[in-house]
Amino acid sequence: MHHTHEPAILYFGTPVVLLSTLNADGSPNLAPMSSVFWLGWRCMIGLDASSRTTENIRRTGQCVMNLPSADQAAHVDRIALTTGSDPVPSRKRQRGYRFEANKFGCAGFTPAPSEAVAPPRALECPVHLEATLEGEHGLAQSDLYLKGAVVSFELRILRAHIDDAIMMDGEANRVDPDKWRPLIMSFQKFYGLGPQLQPSRLASVPEAAYRSPDIDRARAALARAG
């Protein structure tokens, strides 16, 4: 039976992303988040407006979206209650956050150079998506309590670095969902994906049909840079 309930949060399950950005002094920052969805080579992310990551993306217009696998949950959890902001913002201090300057070292990930953006990639993650900021959108603008507390960014992907181990055999540009096991956050707990339940009718549409002009745009920018 269904009844009316009022959960404090509605995080029914989304992939975990480690956002790497550059601090004002040039040092790297790494922050876990899970408020994200993709459409083509663009995505929307939601962040605490007071976070160092938000500040860095606004200032530089760049980030790398590193997607950890399910077996990297312990690494992600090491920085789950840390912030690169010093002093710690009051909202985060009340929730038990502490300042951590070396997020990469704390998590046990290795910074690796990116191709199209300045922030480094987290080498051990199976997926690195270099991205540029396309727009900022406020949330709850009509609510006096929530206005300014959270922001949403539109990001455009410039490079996609993907571990060969999760690519589909015989296909140059397709990730194999039977090999890729992303780390999932659901109601503040870590989960992984189970095996495929059944084929989907959506799979009858070739993936190439969804190809975005942003891919050619990214290729052209790489050629100009080279």
Image (cartoon, grey):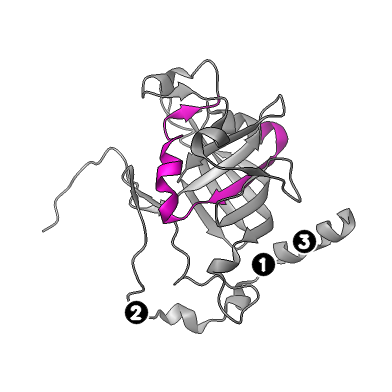
Neighbor class of circle 3 (other Cα within 10 Å; few <14, some 14-19, many 20+) is few
What mark, if any, has residue 212 been given in the picture? 1
Give the residue type at disc 2. Gln
Q: Secondary structure at mark 3?
A: helix
Q: Secondary structure at mark 1?
A: loop
Of labels 2 and 1, the one closer to you: 2
Compared to residue 10, the image places residue 163 above or below, namely below
Closer-to-camera residue (216/27): 27
Question: What is the quadrant of residue 29 in the picture?
Answer: top right
Question: For the magenta stretch, what is the residue range?
Answer: 58-84
Q: Which residue is drawn at the image coordinates 69% and 41% (left, top)?
A: 62
Q: Considering only order in the chain, which callout, 3 or 1, is on the residue closer to the N terminus?
A: 1
Instruction: Tell me the quarter of the image containing the N terminus.
Output: bottom left
Give the residue type at disc 1. Ser
40 left or right of 75 in image: right
Give the residue type at disc 3. Arg
Horizontal and vertical percent for residue 176?
51, 72
